[in-house]
Image (cartoon, rainbow, N blue to C red):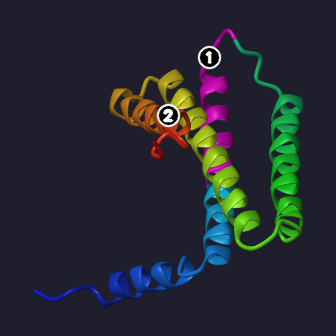
Amino acid sequence: MGHDPMAVYLFDWLRHAVATNEGKVLYLLALICMAMIVDFIVGSLAAWRNPNIKFTSQRGIDGILRKLASILVLVVCIPVSALIPAEAGVIALIVLYLGYLVMELASIVENLDNLGVPVAPLRAFIENVKDVAHNDDNNEGKDEK
């Protein structure tokens, strides 16, 4: 029983892709784009199945345009981050992208819930991530006495 060479290659490629902070930024942007696509598809299915929601092409187009506008803003933040000294701009961009990714994932979970998919473990995970982030924000700078 050996390792699948394709799987090893994939994980090596992913490790190489996130080896630098700049690589992490692009990787996170790709993850956000993938999450947006999944969110749009799952949200459209949830709306289509819900008799209380009028499923129209105009609402779908509006959703796509909102997603494209969000991507445009996130991409514009890349050159803006270069104006911030040292690595602080790239780190701020990573934090922004992680936050946006968590919001997209929460939206996917909400849409899956609307479809009737059991999402309790996913909700618990997202709440734990929010709690950790909230506690880190509250404890910032308190290490020095």
Q: Is residue 97 placed above or below 18 in the rendered structure?
A: above
Left or right, 56 with respect to 30, comes to right
Asked whether 47 falls inside the magenta stretch, the response is yes
Q: Is residue 108 magenta?
A: no
Is residue 93 or residue 56 the one in the foreground? 93
* SS at badge 1: loop
Judging by the rendered image, the residue that carries numbered circle 1 is 50
Quadrant where the image shows the C terminus: top left
Q: Quadrant of residue 6?
A: bottom left
Mark 1 or mark 2: which comes first in sequence? 1
- Residue 23 drawn at (x, y percent): 63, 77
Gap in angstroms between the C-alphas marked 1 and 2 = 29 Å
Q: Amino acid at mark 2?
A: Lys
Which percent across, then down, holds residue 79?
88, 69
Q: The residue tagged with tag 2: helix, strand or loop? A: helix
Region of the chain picked out in magenta, as a range: 35-52
Give the quadrant of residue 122: top left
Which residue appears at 48% of the width and 78% of the height? 14
Label 1 sits on what residue type?
Asn
Name the disc covering residue 66, or none: none
Please identify the quadrant where the N terminus is shown. bottom left
Query: Mark 1: few, some, or many residues within 10 Å (few <14, many ≥20)?
Result: few
x, y percent for residue 77 = 84, 59
Q: Give me the residue at 27% from left, 85% from top.
A: 4
Q: How many marks?
A: 2
- On the image, the x and y values in percent for residue 26 come to 68, 70
Residue shown at the point (21%, 86%) measured from the top left: 3
Between 14 and 4, the residue placed more toward the observer is 14
Kindly give the residue lying farthest to the left in the view shown: 1
Residue 130, numbered circle = 2
Magenta segment's dominant SS is: helix
